[in-house]
Amino acid sequence: MRSSSVEARVEALLAKMTLAEKIGQLWQGHQATSANLEKIRRGEVGSLLNVKAEDMLTCQRAAIEESRLGIPLIIGRDVIHGFHTVAPIPLGQAASFNPSTVRQGARMAAREAAAAGIHWTFTPMVDIARDPRWGRIAESLGEDPYLASILGAAMVRGFQGTDDATPRREGVPPGWENLSEPDSIAACVKHYVGYGAAEGGRDYNTTLIPESELRNVYLPPFLACIEAGAATLMSAFNDLNGIPTSGNVRTLRTILKEEWGFEGFVVSDWASIEEMIAHGYCEDHREAAFKAMRAGVDMEMYSPCYPDHLAALIESGEVPLGWLDDATRRILRVKFHLGLFDRDPATAINPQVSLSEDHRRIAYQSAVESCVLLKNDGLLPLGDRETIALIGPLADAPADQLGCWVPDGRAEDTTTVRTALEKRLGKAKVRFAPGLDYSNQTGQDGFSAALAAAREADKLLVVVGESAWLSGEAHSRAYLELPGSQQALIEALAGLGKPLAVVVMAGRPLVMNRWAAQVNAILWAWHPGTEGGAAIVDLIYGDQSPSGRLPVSFPETVGQVPIYYNKRNTGRPPREGQSGLPIGTPLDPCDFTSRYLDADFHPAYTFGYGLTYTTFVFSPVILSSDEMKPGSTLEARVTITNSGKRAGIAVPQLYLRDRSASLTRPVGELKGFQRIEIAPGESGDVVFEINEDHLRFYNEENQAVVEPGEFHLWIGADARCLLDSPVVFQLKF
Ligand code: BGC
């Protein structure tokens, strides 16, 4: 559905544009270089990315006041998990299992970015990521399509200023209603598609994904974001089944534009059109321009294939004019809906919005909800009276705790664990000795000071992990242990026999099998952002209760990777308790199952897992019927009782399995979750409604189908519930 007034304005403008001006709209330059400014004046630039704050107005004025048609630029930037106020990395935000918190984080970022003159962010990244070696797992929303769909859509709404209550506006694409508000920016869902499945976890690497799997696992979060109104989409870097995603007709033109009816525009990733030459898919820039246009990439980021070759390709008839007009229309449509033609660029700029008390509170709450308590033998929460030795390279690392992709986050605005702890206890009660200057430092020069501090203290709080630059784009790792000498540091401290809690700040799951047993508590804090230190200290002291749940499985060892809960069963699933070297003859048929000889087949911590300071007991699931007919619904109900002494937040999760289908289906798939606060001794009822949509999947012919037969259902505290006996129902046609 298109706004007739916007569409009329688009058409009127299009009719005035020369071929060169249309091609100009399709190119995005990097920064306000003098060459780019010249191009802007000539109408050869549609967008800029990563413009410095001080250049923002100059560029926009050059476009509006000096180019022939005065078409404004759309100015884009990587506002990934905050602008000046930084929320936890997206993987951390996903651990909140809380769309409302995630939406708030995006809203905050949008307000700050818009006030700096930015119109467009390159997020959310909804690439399903099941390989912690991949550095960009930090930017992802984890391994599960359902969770990523819900949270990705929440981010889109946050950036574009809508929510469930936003009234639909006649003729405006759903989700675009508030794009023109001064505190909205356009979202860009990325990286389309399959990028997170990079072989070996090595960034930019090849992906091979059958279309049914693409549709069942990798595409759903993109569709959810488009349905939430994402105004733009970014094509990816990866080769998908032999065709790079920035030249992929099937995924872009057929699925995105024709099947889903996407009305916004597609931007390539950075030089990903040009990179089709390196992929071996195009001979030269000219062919790359042709293939990207054929696929439906509307705007080229950075590389010069479109500006250098589109005119000739159109003249020769290889690229029909209709493709160019369609791309230009889409870009202009977004610009009009953003209100760029109707606002004075100078009025947007208002840096006061940044780091307001309200925004710090949002970042704090997001950090509180993102932390996952992995282990606690009763040490946490700590009491205020003890002296604490605060050790570890991340305890007072204000830039590192912001994580990857924070071009605008500033170390000086950050509350570290050290700052927050000293504020709480007073400096006299905190013995700070980092032990290592940064996470991957080797050697043990700082250990003696750390051990001395530890000897003087009652309890030890160790903050370790990964420096920010160990995750993110092009930062894949082949080892997943704590880098540098951090493990040795923990072991040395554990040797003192004092109560020891470890906080980990990292951009990915790490393996902890060599040290987890030696410590009393582990709080996983990801890279927690501007208010991370305050959130962690409040959690450690029990002012807040941990409520985060893992959005991704944590392997026991890197050799298990990829390991994710929603796997298929195999014909020889391993049995519980089966690990270690086989007993009996090597020909014992019991030994021939899908497992490792030298590691468990379970992850160290599974998807959905997270402790809090109380315990919950789930009642058996009660299903409204053991039969379901198409068009009808079932209700699944559990009662959750807080059996501990403190209030806490339970996160019940609904999992379903299609027991036998025309394509093998995963052993369980998340289909619902809730957050429910329960007081000690109290119970809460949780109800999930199940309808046909929850049972649908794409079959071998890539058709969405619901097949009759037996379904299994669980409601549990995490994906380990899939090991319990399911509740069974039949779908009958
Ligand atoms: C990344 C994108 C990012 C773009 C612009 C690329 O290298 O893959 O995610 O939005 O750069 O900075």
Image: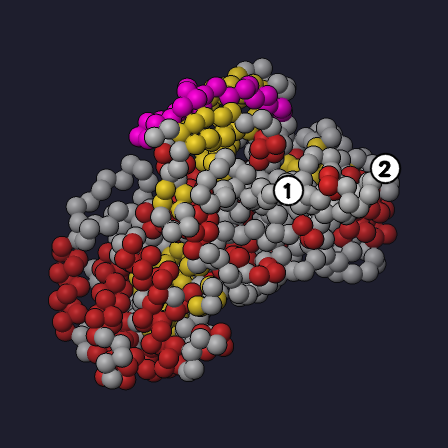
- Residue 199 picture quarter: bottom right
Measured from the top left, where is residue 425 in percent x and y? 69, 36
Q: CA distance from mark 1 to mark 2?
A: 44 Å
In the picture, measured across the screen, residue 613 lies left or right of residue 673, that is right
Q: Please state which amino acid type lies under the numbered disc 1.
A: Arg
* Of 43 and 203, the residue lying toward us: 203
In the displayed structure, 18 sits above or below 186; it is below
In the displayed structure, 501 sits above or below 155; it is above
Asked which secondary structure carries label 2, the reply is loop
Q: Is residue 436 visible?
A: yes
Which residue bears the numbered disc 2?
497
> Which scheme is used to colour this image of the protein?
secondary structure
For marks 1 and 2, the one nearer the N-term is 2
* Of 11 and 70, the residue lying toward us: 11
Measured from the top left, where is residue 463 in percent x and y? 70, 46
Magenta residues?
Answer: 614-636
Q: Is residue 86 visible?
A: no
Measured from the top left, where is residue 477 in percent x and y? 65, 60
Give the crowd class for mark 2: few <14, some 14-19, many >=20 residues within 10 Å.
few
Q: Please state which amino acid type lies under the numbered disc 2.
A: Gly
Please tell me which residue is depicted at 29% across the width and 58% down the height of the picture. 257
In the picture, measured across the screen, residue 549 lies left or right of residue 426, that is left
Please tell me which residue is depicted at 39% across the width and 69% down the height of the picture. 247
Asked which secondary structure carries label 1, the reply is loop
In the displayed structure, 245 sits above or below 29; it is above
Magenta stretch containing residue 620, yes or no?
Answer: yes
* Of 515 and 630, the residue lying toward us: 630
Q: Which mark is residue 572?
A: 1
